[in-house]
Image: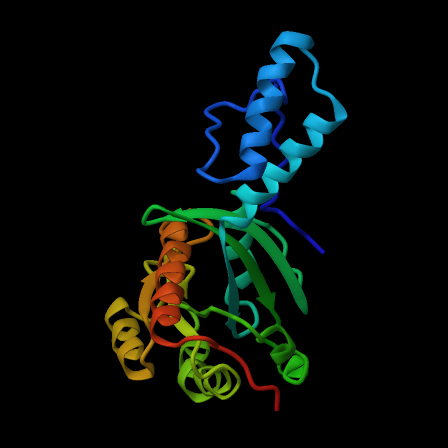
Amino acid sequence: MRNYGMRNKSSEQNISQPAGFEPARGDPIGLAVQRLNHSAKAASPHPTLTQALVLIMSGRQDTESRRPLKITVVGDGTVGKTCLLISYTANSFPTEHEPTVFDNYAKTLTVDGAEFSLTLWDTAGQEEYEKLRPLSYPKTDCFILCYAVDNRSSFANIESKWIGELRQHCPLAAVLLVGTKADLIAQGSNPVTEQEGKKLKSKIKAKGFLHCSAKTGDNIDNVFIESVRAAMNMKDKSKPSRCCSML
């Protein structure tokens, strides 16, 4: 299972003195860290095991403060779902196509002042995986529903196949319509236009619509920013549950 979006960040900062650490009022762990830091300065420059454990627990609280969201990318095979995810999480573009059954990625993102912990699910678009694919749908907050601008069949399948499948399994999840491979618009003989995409967005009642290119990176970040906004908008409107029914 690939996890392109996860990075290990090293720090030379003394573990007993986290930068800018201010305990919240009434926070027992935070107050404990503050007391340990004061005693550490007087006793030893090196953290004790107890200090390290307290700081780890404090770090867990920071992680838990991020809002978890599940984003699932769907659409026909070869429309560029995997390329979209790799371009976003690893800032790279795969040169070879490898069909996906299931895969996921992780990414943290700040949107409108709030920090989110994203779990990004890649799915198979091929017909032979139609019975397996819905297993990845439960608890999805937003679906990124993709078609390729140079493939009118994938565009037609949004309405004839995909939106029905998503509404059947997750009727309350947000949907963001995305036209991939936007760099090919100028090269195609009959590409799907942006106006056609906007019209379809209204027809299927998607929360938004964007064109993007995983190859050039154009609009990639905005796809995930808008998916977070769409998910949070739906969370506000439909509590406590978004998804799903397994039929």
13 relative position to 218: left or right: right
Between residues 96 and 37, which one lies in front from this camera angle?
37
97 relative position to 166: left or right: right
Q: Is residue 90 visible?
A: no
On the rendered image, what quadrant is the N terminus found in?
Answer: bottom right
Between residues 15 and 77, which one lies in front from this camera angle?
15
204 relative position to 140: left or right: left
Question: x%, y% of residue 196?
Answer: 27, 75
Question: x%, y% of residue 235?
Answer: 39, 69
In the image, residue 29 sits, relative to residue 207, either above or below, namely above
In the image, residue 44 sits, relative to residue 246, either above or below, namely above
At horizontal 40% and vertical 85% (from top left) the residue drawn is 159
Q: Quadrant of residue 236?
A: bottom left
In the image, residue 191 sits, relative to residue 218, either above or below, namely below
Question: x%, y% of residue 77?
Answer: 57, 72
At horizontal 40% and vertical 73% (from top left) the residue drawn is 175
Question: x%, y% of residue 122?
Answer: 59, 64
